[in-house]
Image (spheres, helix red, strand yellow):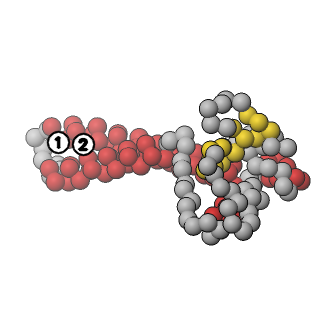
Amino acid sequence: MSDSMIREKPTAFGSIRQNNIFNGHSPLKLFTHAKITITDIFKNIASYVNDSNTYLNDVIKSDRNLITNDKYKEIQQLKERVSRILSIISRDHMKVVFFGRTSNGKSTVMNAMLREKILPIGMGHTTNCFLQIEGTDKNEPSVLIPGSDELKSIN
């Protein structure tokens, strides 16, 4: 089984693909935009939680008993959860894995999700290798072979 990574989409639907790239409606670009938006939201939430935590640290150190130790621990756990979520969604790469028996429609599902025919489909062993699909701002589809930094054109 050979490993390869498709950096961009083949031009099976040429003009449709070009329109998607230029008007920003590529599913991978939409996903990237959504991911950036969600990351920004969680950065703001983390900032508010950290500011609140700083205040609560001062409160807990005072002798005023404005907050119970249980409530303080609960807030600390919230801070940790927000930090974990932020670290996960801030990653540069997120991976989704499709696996299943031969000819069960894995490539068809991925093509449907991306709204374009990117992966080959057919009966039997069609794809027959591990693939990693990534979006790019380039208009030219390419393949990156493991062990090489050189992008090879698909066209």
Quadrant of image for the C terminus: top right
Q: Quadrant of residue 143?
A: top right
**Residue lying farthest left?**
63
Q: Nearer the viewer, residue 152 or 69?
A: 152
Badge number at residue 56:
2
The percent position of residue 80, horizontal first and vertical second, equals: 31, 46
Type of the residue with mark 1: Ile
The percent position of residue 110, horizontal first and vertical second, equals: 66, 61
The percent position of residue 141, horizontal first and vertical second, equals: 78, 43
Few, some or many residues within 10 Å of mark 1 (<14, 14–19, 20+): some
Q: Would residue 114 be visible to someone looking at this image?
A: no
Total numbered circles: 2
Point 10% across, 40% down: residue: 63
Q: Is residue 149 above or below residue 65?
A: above
**Residue lying farthest top?**
149
Q: Nearer the viewer, residue 86 or 130?
A: 130
Badge number at residue 60:
1
- Left or right, 35 with respect to 54, comes to right
Q: Quadrant of residue 140?
A: top right
The percent position of residue 83, horizontal first and vertical second, equals: 37, 44
- Left or right, 154 with respect to 79, comes to right
Few, some or many residues within 10 Å of mark 2 (<14, 14–19, 20+): some
Point 58% across, 45% down: residue: 36
Q: Would residue 127 be visible to someone looking at this image?
A: yes
Q: Nearer the viewer, residue 76 or 104?
A: 104
Q: CA distance from mark 1 to mark 2?
A: 6 Å
Tag 1–tag 2 contact (CB < 8 Å) = yes
Point 73% across, 34% down: residue: 151
Point 77% across, 36% down: residue: 152
Q: Nearer the viewer, residue 138 or 56?
A: 138
- Left or right, 83 with respect to 9, comes to left
Type of the residue with mark 2: Leu
